[in-house]
Amino acid sequence: MSASPVFVADRATLLTQLRLPESSLSGIDPVVDLAIQRGRVEIYGRLSISRVATLQAIAYAENAATANQLLRLKANLLEVKLVRSLLMRELPMLFMDGSNQSHQAWNEDAFSRNVEASKQKAHLRALTEDIETLFTELEDNDYASSGGGVNTYVPERDDGRYVPGSAIKVYTGDEGDEA
């Protein structure tokens, strides 16, 4: 049984988005499945099971127009980029055996074709930064989004003296709340 993606509709759609046609996968199916499984583990590990379930419950729309649809679109993009980055790390080693025919489509893809190691590393680094940004945007930050946080202020005193600890105010989102 093939590995299933978390956010992308199905394996075939994910492979299409990776520009990996099913016909070119002979011999590398286990590597692709492992990348999908590793992506699944990382997504669940970073976002939590409940957050993933929340994002999965949002209907996917290619032309996202609402905040929720944009979140779901970002989740799909995250999974595609994550699996791509994992495959970029694994597949170049697979091509050293010289049997290039079954992997021709992957080799002809722009990011892996005749690219200097430094450019490939730069591309992978940019991809990793995109992945981190998407993870950050998809994390469930209820506390941060509700206005919670810690602010500092300078206490107003008539005599101008500083009182230790008086410059810290915990802001909970309601005016006037102090801890």
Image (spheres, rainbow, N blue to C red):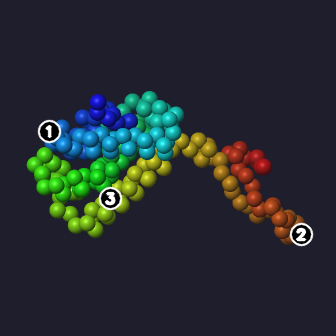
Determine the CA span between mark 3 and mark 2: 58 Å
Q: Earlier in the sequence, mark 2 or mark 1?
A: 1
Q: Residue at x 71, y 50 (%)?
A: 171
Residue 143 % position (x, y): 62, 44
Q: Residue furthest left?
A: 101
Residue 169 lies in quadrant? bottom right
Residue 159 % position (x, y): 89, 69
Determine the CA span between mark 1 and mark 3: 26 Å
The amino acid type found where label 2 is placed reads Asp
Query: Of circles 3 and 2, which is in front?
Result: 3
The amino acid type found where label 1 is placed reads Ser
Residue hosting label 1: 23
The answer to whether residue 176 is above or below residue 118 is: above
The amino acid type found where label 3 is placed reads Leu
Observer able to see residue 21 = no
Q: Are marks 2 and 1 in contact (CB under 8 Å)?
A: no
Residue 14 lies in quadrant? top left
Q: Earlier in the sequence, mark 1 or mark 3?
A: 1
User: In the image, is 170 to the left or to the right of 35?
Assistant: right
Residue hosting label 3: 124
Query: Of circles 1 and 3, which is in front?
Result: 1
Give the number of the disc on residue 159. 2
Q: Residue at x 28, y 68 (%)?
A: 118
Tell me the crowding category of disc 1: few under 14, some 14 to 19, or many 20 or more residues within 10 angstroms, Cα based: few
Residue 45 % position (x, y): 48, 43
Residue 170 % position (x, y): 73, 52
Q: Earlier in the sequence, mark 3 or mark 2?
A: 3
Give the number of the disc on residue 166. none
